[in-house]
Image (cartoon, rainbow, N blue to C red):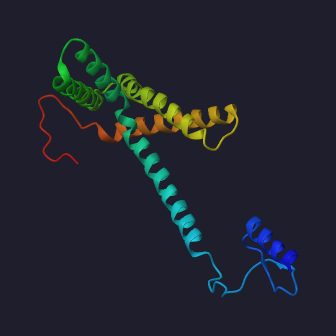
Amino acid sequence: MSAVFSISIEAKLLAPQLRLVSVSYPELRRGGGGRRDQYIYAHGATTLLAIGLVLNTLGIGLFCWAIFTLAVYALPFFVALSIGITAYQRGAGLVGTPLIATAGGTLTLVLGQVAFAATRSSALRIAIATAFAVPAAVAGYHVVFALSQIGAPSLAGRDVFACLGAVCIGLTSWTRLMVLAKPRPFEPGEVVENPS
């Protein structure tokens, strides 16, 4: 009897899920009594996985939308950042620096759009659009390169994705500048009554 008792104590200490069926038949078995879980599907894990996949897809889509929407503003942002750093180094302070930087970036955007809309020279329009598209393409390259590290294991694959992203974002910036600054008919000395 002491041998059976020592086996049951050792079994309880080593593996608490194992138990003796009976004292007269000292064979250990797995499992235990009790009722089984009536749910045949794992509700919590499956639901959280589905919600996580949907939210990740929406988040990545929102991030890509923001990149393409803000691509036009890459040049004004870089100009505003440069003016802000210079103003802070010259002693503009914490209040004046953002105001000067915002004014510089806004002025760059407005002047670029007005110059693009007012000029009739195709070469000048291409130069202005290129000035807006190149910083957007550089920013797009770096963003897509950083994002491609998630899925592309090789450096060559990341570079290919980054180059494609740079081209797409640069073309998006070019197109948005064309849409935002539509050229209007301009004749000196003539007033347009119904511009359509």
Establish if 5 lies above or below 128.
below
Of 99 and 74, the residue lying toward us: 99
Of 87 and 70, the residue lying toward us: 87
Q: Give the residue displayed 20% in from the left and 27% down from the top.
A: 103
Q: Which residue lies furthest to the front in this view?
A: 2
The quarter holding residue 100 reads top left
Tell me residue 179's x, y (percent): 34, 42
Is residue 31 shown left or right of residue 56? right
Is residue 63 shown left or right of residue 121? right
Q: Give the residue displayed 21% in from the left and 33% down from the top.
A: 186
Q: Give the residue displayed 83% in from the left and 72% down from the top.
A: 7
Tell me residue 176's x, y (percent): 37, 40
Establish if 169 lies above or below 86.
below
Tell me residue 171's x, y (percent): 47, 36
The quarter holding residue 175 reads top left
Is residue 21 shown left or right of residue 169? right
Q: Which residue lies furthest to the top in this view?
A: 90
Q: How many labels does the image show?
A: 0
Q: Quadrant of the N terminus?
A: bottom right
The quarter holding residue 156 reads top right
Tell me residue 91's x, y (percent): 19, 14
Of 142 and 126, the residue lying toward us: 142
Q: Give the residue displayed 47% in from the left and 34% down from the top.
A: 170
Establish if 164 lies above or below 99.
below
